Image: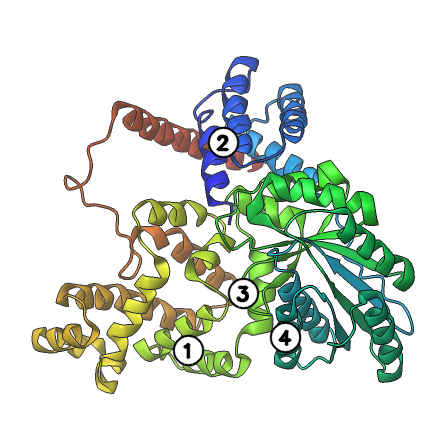
Amino acid sequence: MFETLQDSLMSAIRTLRGRGKLTESNMREGLDLVRQSLLEADVSFPVVKDFIAKISERALGESVRKLLDPTEQLVKIVHEELIQLMGPVDHDLHLRKPFATFMLCGLQGSGKTTTCGKLGKLLVKRDLKPMLVAADLQRPAAIDQLEILGQSIGVPVHVDRESKNPVKVCQDAARKAASLGVDVLILDTAGRLHIDEELMEQLRQIEQELQPDQVYFVVDAMTGQDAVNSAKAFNEALELDGVILTKLDGDTRGGAALSVKHITGVPIKFVGTGESVESLEEFYPNRMAGRILGMGDMLTLIEQATEQLDKETIEKQQERLAKGEFTLDDFRSQMGQAKRLGSFGKLLGFIPGMGEITSMMGKMNVDADDELKRVGGIIDSMTPDEKQNPKIIDNSRRHRIAAGAGVEPQQVSDLIKSFLPMAEMMKSMSSMNGRDRMAVLQQMTKSFGKNPINGVTPPKKGTGKRLTSQEKNEARKKREKEKKKREKEKAREKYKK
């Protein structure tokens, strides 16, 4: 998500790389590009103006730290201001006895009904008993959809196809919830293609009669600035408790996420990051700011892994590793586990430092998931003996495997060449302590973009595109920066001693 905004912001910040310190002149150059990046992401102009003013004031007012170059210092400031812009967020659901009522509202096409199912699933995972209410009587399809969602997550759905009064439907559902011992009642209210007084009056009646504990506005993040305008209108009518942004896994420019809290004063409570009922996350401004700036979001990745990965399969793989065993079958199994967390490109976005790699793959029109499918196809075309010991694969076997997988023989060779050192590393890690194992994993992460399995391999010397003068200059500045950093680290270590 936010790939375009991330690329633009980091490009703007990189213009300061190699400068000795932050000055008013070089800051103005970088901030002009930051401003342009935010406006292109459809962030509200008043938000951009205030945001840039705060960054400029802080950057020029702070003394330059000896161990931070201007780029790193500006990234830190932008990161902190992004957190302030999108937060704080109260994650308390404010549950009460005998049950709490959540009211979801929004325009048609925002994903409101699907979000009801996702929210219900999230509550089930927290050992709560929700019930969904089909109060959108404008669209019969919405009632059918909610029933299907309820069945898929094992949650009761209150439906009254004869009634034309959504307020009565909600009141009947409330009485039913009390008798069933429901913890949370989730109301799926009607939407419109646009905001009108009839819609708002209907929602106000439901709010007045049901007195919901939480009123959430569901909005499509891909609508950009229009999402913020809609949130503002609904908040004036209903006094919203939170916003749920949907479709953040799509081509989201980022304007809604960065603008909605500042303009409306209403925090983003949840974000939808996929089509499955599992893909609803609590919104954390600090984590989102990290993703936008390419810093990753390891906490969210760990939480998703804990919830969704097959613990029994992982334990078996760990037992095999402890015995020093790691085959292509094990690698294939790990790929399948990782796939349960979402697309490979999405996973890379969670890992610090991987943002630039996903951007590079996008510019080269390389789909990471397609590459992994190809790797899986190659492994599936091997015999059990070949998966156990890839070293036995000779020229004849290589051509047979390539034909079975629909790839070139060279791609089979590339996979084997990449896998063998990985297997040795995994085996050696089995006898390491936690600290040494982490060091190896960090090294693997750093080298990922240099030699990925059957993926994007940088062109060899002399075979790629010739560098422009600007690119050569940037490369030289990067080398000088790294040299200065090493010298500072040596000086710091010497001072400690």
From what the image shows, is residue 6 above or below residue 404?
A: above
Residue contact between numbered discs 4 and 2, judged by CB atoms under 8 Å: no
Residue at screen point 64% across, 81% down:
151
| Mark seen at residue 144 | 4
Mark 3 nearby-residue class (10 Å; few <14, some 14–19, many ≥20): some
Looking at the image, is mark 1 or mark 3 earlier in the sequence?
3
The residue that disc 2 covers is 491
The amino acid type of the residue labelled 3 equals Glu
Mark 1 nearby-residue class (10 Å; few <14, some 14–19, many ≥20): many
Quarter of the image where one finds residue 210: bottom right
Closer to the eye: label 1 or 4: 4
Q: Quadrant of the C terminus?
A: top right
Frontmost residue, 403 versus 203: 203
Rendered location of residue 172, percent (x, y) = 86, 75
The amino acid type of the residue labelled 4 equals Asp
Q: CA distance from mark 3 to mark 2?
A: 52 Å
Q: Secondary structure at mark 1?
A: helix
The residue that disc 1 covers is 321
From what the image shows, is residue 239 above or below residue 32?
A: below
Q: CA distance from mark 4 to mark 2?
A: 68 Å
Tell which residue pokes out farthest to the bottom in this image. Answer: 384
Closer to the eye: label 4 or 2: 4
Looking at the image, is mark 4 or mark 2 earlier in the sequence?
4
